[in-house]
Amino acid sequence: MKHDAHKLVFIGAGNMAEALIKGVLHKSLASPEDVAATDVNGVRLEYIRSAYGVETFEHNAAGVALADVLFLAVKPQSFGEVLPEIAEHLNREKTLVISIAAGVSTSRIESALGEGTRVVRVMPNIAALAGVGAAGVCAGRWANGDDLARAEDILGAVGVAARVEESQMDAVTAISGSGPAYVFYLIEAMQEAAKELGLNENTARRLILMTVRGAAELCESSGEPAALLRERVTSKGGTTAAALAVMKEWGVKEHLVEAMRAARDRSNELSGPKG
Ligand SMILES: NC(=O)c1ccc[n+]([C@@H]2O[C@H](COP(=O)([O-])OP(=O)(O)OC[C@H]3O[C@@H](n4cnc5c(N)ncnc54)[C@H](OP(=O)(O)O)[C@@H]3O)[C@@H](O)[C@H]2O)c1
């Protein structure tokens, strides 16, 4: 066991919890004996135990009592049931609570778990399953800088984590939370075009996926704005210019911005009254 090991306990051992368990073990942020998970689904628990060698519990209470860091990784609709159960067994001095549930505010969690509970809220995305997720992280009322840093370290094991204010969580949801779907949509469009233009499906898939990854990596490694990279690759009168002229004519960029505004508004509606 690492000298600074803390017991990480996941309430809900679904897809996101699995991604995080895999990430922290792979990056040696914790050993299997420092990690535990609970779930209502016994088959799922058996899988998590045998795949990762972590401790599992059928009852949330057993996990809560052990936790230094307690991850709330159930669906938002399960919070009504899970929070009172946690409140009964939580050690408020010891345990940092990290919620990854979409749209559940820190104030809702704090009022259910009691005054002084240190809560960090995270908005991850599905790419965490591939170890390359992007997450927004914000502190609740009683969480401190060390708590945020701990959440960032753990999320950092499955991608990047960026600190934001809680008031920006709907924006994070619209940009990086739902973001992978926008990129899948672009990939779909490129695949449809490739088919129409006569490319073999497998060849097109390989070329497109590397193109998307390559563009992101070049943007990151060069540190240059996307607009500048786009201009540099667009010769006057060339093929890229022909494609971009169509996109401009159809207002593709403006419509994408509009789409993300709609996602932000929907996130705001779904998370209900703020408080
Ligand atoms: N997946 C994503 O891309 C994504 C992105 C951003 C945020 N999130 C957030 O991450 C959280 C987890 O999502 P997920 O995709 O990992 O969900 P998931 O795969 O459905 O995992 C949730 C697990 O919790 C179990 N569970 C249900 N009620 C429980 C209870 N009372 N006590 C203990 N376990 C219980 C579920 O069992 P049953 O299936 O038997 O009900 C399931 O195994 C959600 O709050 C979601 O908003 C997910």
Image (tube, rainbow, N blue to C red):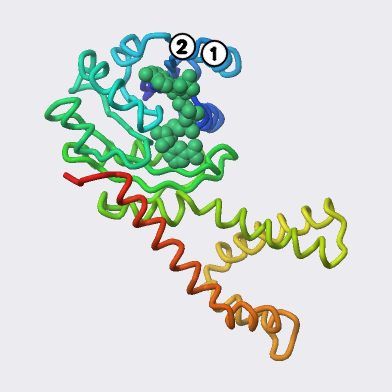
Residue 185 in percent (x, y) is at 61, 57
Percent position (x, y) of residue 97?
A: 29, 29
Q: Is residue 35 left or right of residue 126?
A: left
Task: Find out whether the residues at labels 2 and 1 contact each other: C-beta distance under 8 Å.
Answer: yes
Q: Position of residue 88 (x, y in %)?
A: 20, 14
What's the CA distance linking mark 2 and mark 1? Answer: 6 Å
Secondary structure under the numbered disc 1 in the rendered image: helix
Q: Residue at x 26, y 23 (%)?
A: 83
Residue furthest left in the image: 115
Using the rendered image of the protein, determine whether residue 210 is visible from the camera's viewpoint: yes
Location of the N terminus (image quadrant): top left
Cβ at disc 1 under 8 Å from ligand 1: no
Tell me the tag on residue 56: 2
Residue found at the far bottom of this picture: 237
Residue marked by disc 1 = 49
Residue 24 drawn above or below residue 218 = above
- Left or right: 109 in relation to 4: left
Determine the residue positioned at 70% across, 86% down.
235
Q: Amino acid at mark 1?
A: Arg
Labels 2 and 1: the sequence-earlier one: 1
Q: Quadrant of residue 69?
A: top left
